[in-house]
Image (tube, rainbow, N blue to C red):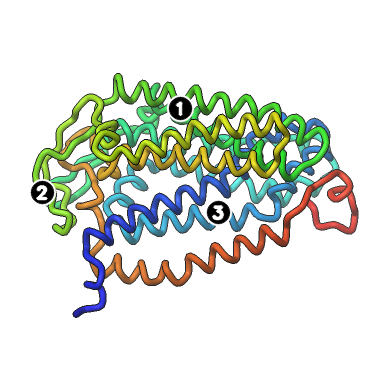
């Protein structure tokens, strides 16, 4: 028996769909609080020292946290080539805006304290705000557009045609999803500051985080109701061949009202995801008010996991529906790499992903502890 046939093609496709979700969640729960802290920076810290405290809560780990974004992008490129081709070309300007904002973060960390000038430092503080807020918003806007369908199609020779524009992405439902994303990551950043910072920074973060947690509940509810009432979902109407070739044009698809909620009737266990989204945010709010620092972060993690999982489970088996030609929609069954490629990648992942998890855990253990004003003003320290 050929080695890669030890696992069926359809099983490998499901495994990589799950792994992609794991990587996206890992990015959101690690680099997510970095983005949240950047968004909160001008508001939770009022003096230069307080802002240095906030910055240094993430200064030692933000680079490592971005590894999950790189891994997710690499997984899309290798495991789901059509998804990579459509999304990274169709969302080109949005991706450029995210990259520009993310580039501001290391530059801001590096150069903010190089000059003892209030105007200089204030300018970099707002740059760090942009580096946190813009990606948080655009990631959510992208998800909102995916749920509505993206304007692309495949020709018979599998050439890709994208007929959308950047400003068309900024539609009302997508903006609602963007605000949910911002609220979710602000809640997460607040939970991190409550855990890692001291004094006024932690106190203000607790107040902002409490508001953000309530907004997550409200916006998540509105997003779900809107999805049910006014956003058409997609349903495969032809026979599904889970071990067939990766050719989206071999199926037929229809648009149906409420189709994105159909999976919860077919697979009732999936309701766990949105429940986690709601309960995690509610528990994070209560933990913040009760000053339970570690619990606040854990509950925020649960809420993020639930919200992201809700999107993936609601859309399954679709991963990128097409609003121009529903038949061109990409699904788990027709947008993957070959059987052998998925198997080889899985072997590599099984070897290296635990190493990344172990190393990340060790880094956080070594760097555990509070950041206070004394530690950032000590001239012998390496604080930003």
Residue 105 locus on image (x, y percent): 63, 46
Residue 381 locus on image (x, y percent): 85, 57
Local packing at callout 3 (Cα closer than 10 Å; few below 14, some 14-19, many 20+) is: some
Which quadrant of the figure contains the N terminus?
bottom left
The residue sitting at 63% across, 52% down in the picture is 62
Q: Which mark is residue 250?
A: 2
Pick whichever of labels 2 and 1 is earlier in the sequence.
1
User: Which of the 4 quarters of the picture holds residue 51?
Assistant: top right
Q: Are marks 3 and 1 in contact (CB under 8 Å)?
A: no
Classify mark 1: helix, strand or loop.
Answer: helix
User: Which of the 4 quarters of the picture holds residue 284?
Assistant: top right
Pick whichever of labels 3 and 1 is earlier in the sequence.
3
Q: Which mark is residue 66?
A: 3
Residue identified by numbered label 1: 220
Can see residue 338? yes
Q: What is the CA distance from the residue labelled 2 to the residue labelled 3?
A: 37 Å
Q: What is the CA distance from the residue labelled 2 to the residue labelled 1?
A: 35 Å
Q: What is the CA distance from the residue labelled 3 to the residue labelled 1?
A: 26 Å
Q: In the figure, is residue 299 to the left or right of 142?
A: right
- In the picture shown, does residue 183 fall above or below 243? above
The residue sitting at 28% across, 61% down in the picture is 12
Pick whichever of labels 2 and 3 is earlier in the sequence.
3
Classify mark 2: helix, strand or loop.
Answer: helix
Q: Residue furthest front?
A: 268
The residue sitting at 77% across, 52% down in the picture is 369
Residue 268 locus on image (x, y percent): 30, 37
Q: Which mark is residue 381?
A: none
Classify mark 3: helix, strand or loop.
Answer: loop
Q: Are marks 2 and 1 in contact (CB under 8 Å)?
A: no
């Amino acid at each position: 028996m050929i080695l890669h046939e030890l696992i069926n093609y359809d099983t490998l496709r499901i495994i990589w769909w799950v792994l992609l979700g794991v990587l996206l969640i890992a990015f959101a729960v690690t680099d997510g609080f970095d983005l949240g802290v950047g968004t909160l920076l001008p508001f939770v810290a009022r003096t230069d020292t307080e802002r240095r405290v906030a910055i240094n809560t993430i200064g030692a780990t933000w680079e490592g946290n971005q590894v999950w974004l790189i891994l997710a992008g690499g997984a899309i490129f290798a495991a789901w080539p059509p998804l990579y081709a459509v999304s990274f070309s169709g969302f080109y300007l949005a991706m450029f805006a995210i990259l520009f904002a993310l580039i501001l973060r290391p530059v801001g960390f590096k150069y903010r304290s190089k000059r003892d000038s209030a105007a200089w430092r204030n300018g970099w503080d707002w740059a760090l705000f942009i580096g946190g807020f813009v990606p948080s918003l655009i990631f959510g806007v992208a998800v909102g557009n995916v749920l509505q369908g993206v304007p692309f199609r495949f020709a018979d020779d599998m050439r890709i045609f994208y007929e959308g524009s950047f400003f068309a992405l900024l539609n009302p439902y997508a903006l609602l999803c963007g605000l949910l994303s911002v609220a979710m990551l602000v809640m997460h950043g607040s939970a991190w500051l409550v855990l890692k910072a001291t004094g006024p920074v932690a106190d203000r973060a607790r107040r902002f985080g409490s508001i953000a947690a309530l907004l997550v509940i409200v916006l998540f509810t509105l997003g779900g109701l809107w999805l049910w009432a006014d956003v058409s979902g997609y349903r495969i109407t032809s026979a599904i061949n889970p071990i067939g070739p990766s050719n989206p044009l071999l199926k037929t698809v229809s648009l149906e009202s409420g189709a994105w909620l159909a999976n919860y009737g077919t697979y009732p266990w999936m309701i766990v995801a949105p429940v986690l989204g709601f309960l995690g945010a509610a528990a994070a709010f209560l933990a913040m008010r009760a000053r339970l620092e570690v619990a606040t972060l854990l509950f925020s993690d649960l809420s993020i996991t639930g919200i992201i999982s809700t999107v993936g489970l609601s859309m399954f088996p679709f991963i990128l529906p097409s609003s121009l030609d529903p038949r061109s929609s990409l699904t788990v069954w027709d947008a993957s790499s070959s059987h052998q490629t998925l198997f080889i990648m899985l072997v590599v992942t099984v070897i290296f992903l635990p190493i990344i998890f172990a190393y990340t855990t060790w880094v956080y253990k070594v760097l555990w502890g509070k950041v206070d004003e004394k530690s950032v003003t000590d001239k012998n320290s390496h604080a930003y």
